[in-house]
Amino acid sequence: MTSQKGVTVWFTGLSGAGKTAIARYLEPILRERGLKVERLDGDVVRQSLTRDLGFSKEDRDKNIERVTFVAKLLTRNDVLVLLSFISPYRVMRDHARDEIGNFVEVYCYCTLEALMERDVKGLYKKAIAGEIPNFTGISDPYEEPLNPEVRIDSSTETLEESAAKVLAYLEEHGYVPPVPKLDGSTYTVEEEQLIEERLGALGYL
Amino acid sequence: MTSQKGVTVWFTGLSGAGKTAIARYLEPILRERGLKVERLDGDVVRQSLTRDLGFSKEDRDKNIERVTFVAKLLTRNDVLVLLSFISPYRVMRDHARDEIGNFVEVYCYCTLEALMERDVKGLYKKAIAGEIPNFTGISDPYEEPLNPEVRIDSSTETLEESAAKVLAYLEEHGYVPPVPKLDGSTYTVEEEQLIEERLGALGYL
């Protein structure tokens, strides 16, 4: 494809709910479709952009301000941005939406029970023990999105299912071209989802 | 034109030497040629990216680190970035060059005499009076570029002449398409420079 409409896909939700996992899963799929893609998350920006910031409300806000600025520049230059930050405060997410324009909010929901059971990094255990101050969902607030464009639930969906939801939304709204069929026509979102599930089950995805 | 090769044009030099003036002058000319352009300088990034930073060596380095990151993302997504910061330390500019890849260093030179005589913002007077600590060129070092791609001298050149030098370099290296003639061929850099000078003299630029 020759032209691409920039957009920021903003993944928000508690630590461990799947924000970065979905973004990482989607990144190569979107590149495969010929799109310019940048992924922005803690791992990517910490060294150069947000090294000085902690987890106080003020520092969280600064963090979101900086990545919002970067996402705005990339989006208006036709890049698809996959951005994953807890971003617990509604006012900051709404400000980002206003600044960026083409904005898809993906609420990565997961029950607290499932998060505590998973607890890959052992953070929830520490937070509950009071060893981590300002831990979102335990000792710090998380303001749920009121009208997210996409809502996933990683306590009931597989990673593939959640990613397919996001991809379907992006296709339906013209941010991602549909996969062309061999006869030149294109698959419907449902067909494609089915194909991806099969490819996934066969171990190809 | 359908494709554009990203590049960061990095303007370095003392305060008042013309960095941002040249960038602002070039911005509409480059957009006119159908290019994606972003300008990064203190005015653009202070609010969202570098509000917390002062003029200590450490803060200057952080400033450059952050804008280098942003310029890198834009450049690899095919944007032409006009970036103007004093950026007095050679090691930080060289690091930016390594990170960004397509990199054109424009050394904006001006004699200290001319800068002090101009002194639009009255900063040199204050710095010499000791009222501004860490003022580059007076009470803080400036490490001159050793091999800049372009060197301009705003104590002997007009703004238009300096800008034409930068534009010529960008055209010669394929970052900016040449202006098409009516017969379909293109002007040489010299012809175009001449045309711009004439248009400038006539008040059209």
Image: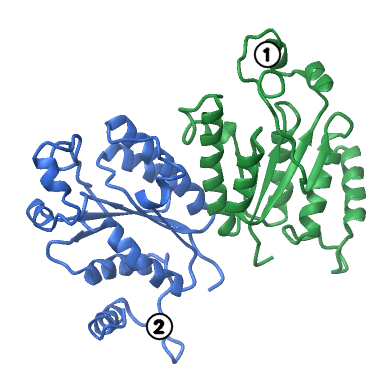
Chain colours: A blue, B green
* Residue ID at (70%, 40%): B11
Left or right placement of residue B179 versus residue A158 in this view: right
Badge number at residue A54? none
List the residue tagged with mark 2.
A186
Alpha-carbon distance for marks 1 and 2?
66 Å
Nearest the eye: B112 or A78: B112
Q: Residue furthest bottom?
A: A183
Q: Position of residue B156 (x, y in %)?
A: 89, 31
Between circles 1 and 2, the one closer to the viewer is 1
Helix, strand or loop at mark 1: helix
What residue type is disc 2 on?
A: Thr
| Quadrant occupied by the N terminus of chain B | bottom right
Q: Quadrant of residue B203?
A: top right
Give the secondary structure at mark 2: loop
Instruction: In the rendered view, tell whether residue A33 sits above or below residue B53.
Output: below
Relative depth, front residue between A68 and A24: A24
Q: Which chain's residue wears label 1?
A: B
Asked whether, in this view, residue B118 is left or right of residue A97, the answer is right
Residue A41 visible in the picture:
no
Q: Residues within 10 Å of mark 1 (few under 14, many from 20)?
A: some
Residue A103 versus residue B174 in the image, above or below? above
Residue at the extreme top: B129
Above or below residue B89? Residue A72 is below
Apparent side of residue A48 relative to residue B188 in the rendered image (left or right): left
Q: Residue visible at 15% across and 56% down? A: A110
Chain containing the residue with disc 2 = A
Instruction: Tell me how many marks there are.
Output: 2
- Amino acid, disc 1: Ala
Query: Residue B127's mark?
Result: 1
